[in-house]
Image: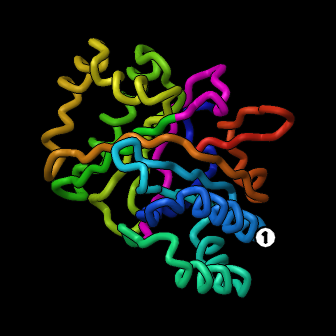
Amino acid sequence: MAGESGGIMFINRNEVEVTLGRSSQFEATIDEWAAVQSQNAGFVGATLLQSCANPGRYLLTSRWTDREASIAAGRREQFTAFAASSLTSGLARATRLTESYESVFEVDQEGVNPVDENAERWIDFSLTSPFVAPQFEESMRQLAEVVKQHAPGFGSARLRRSAGKDTRYVLLLIMQNRDAARGWLLVPEVRAALELSGRREYLAGEPEAEIYAVVKRYVGPGFTAAQTTSVGVAGGHQVLRP
């Protein structure tokens, strides 16, 4: 059913700053990384994003059928050899340690091809306490439904919860373009929903948000196992949303 988690239960997030002038080489390296990960049955897919504010910064999110599949992939000889080579290449430096998340919910727009979704807005939240998590998650779900109904260019809203820190969340808004990723906040119905959501009483501080351009999406062999409904078809190839 559209709007549910689609079985994608484990997500890894990595962020790097690429050496000046080497973006094309870095993106080609991620193609190689994806080929290595595609040897793992539990690899569902990945998305490479480029910061709109700082084009030298990239965010890579990978999706797995479960935590065990992700951990096992990181210990395979093919991956450790690739990682050792990458670490000495001077291509990029990590700006954020790998963070892992679980799916909470997904709200998808009907009839939208993921190929046409070229921007993502990532919003990081820290809660005051794990005890307010159920109320926060419900308020975000209601907000996502309003954005789906009223925001132009909306494709999908996805709430992810840290796999180990009960008060850490990230909301992904997958949009048609950068203008849509920025403009959804100005939609009157969305602004009204934000005021009524009560979300501020759950938060330990102001959310941190950033808009990214989609560089490339990858689909792995675990796609079928994940049984996700959030799929588009372009040129005969399946395209998976994150």
Give the extent of the magenta segment. 98-118
Q: What residue type is labelled 1?
A: Gln
Q: Residue at x 49, y 30 (%)?
A: 175
| Residue found farthest to the right | 236
Q: Mark 1 points at which residue?
A: 39
Report x, y in % for residue 147: 40, 23
Query: Residue 235 colored magenta?
Result: no
Q: Residue at x 40, y 55 (%)?
A: 161
Q: In this view, does 215 lie to the left or right of 13?
A: right
Circle 1 crowding by C-alpha within 10 Å: few under 14, some 14–19, many from 20: some
4 and 72: which one is in front? Answer: 72
82 and 107: which one is in front? Answer: 82
Figure coloring: rainbow
Report x, y in % for residue 127: 21, 53
| Residue 240, visible in the rendered structure | yes
Q: In which quarter of the image is the N terminus?
A: top right
53 and 99: which one is in front? Answer: 53
Report x, y in % for residue 207: 22, 45
Position above or below: 208 against 195: below
Position above or below: 51 against 147: below
| Residue found farthest to the front | 21
| Residue 41, visible in the rendered structure | no
Determine whether the residue tagged by mark 1 lies in a helix, strand or loop.
Answer: loop
Report x, y in % for residue 4: 56, 38
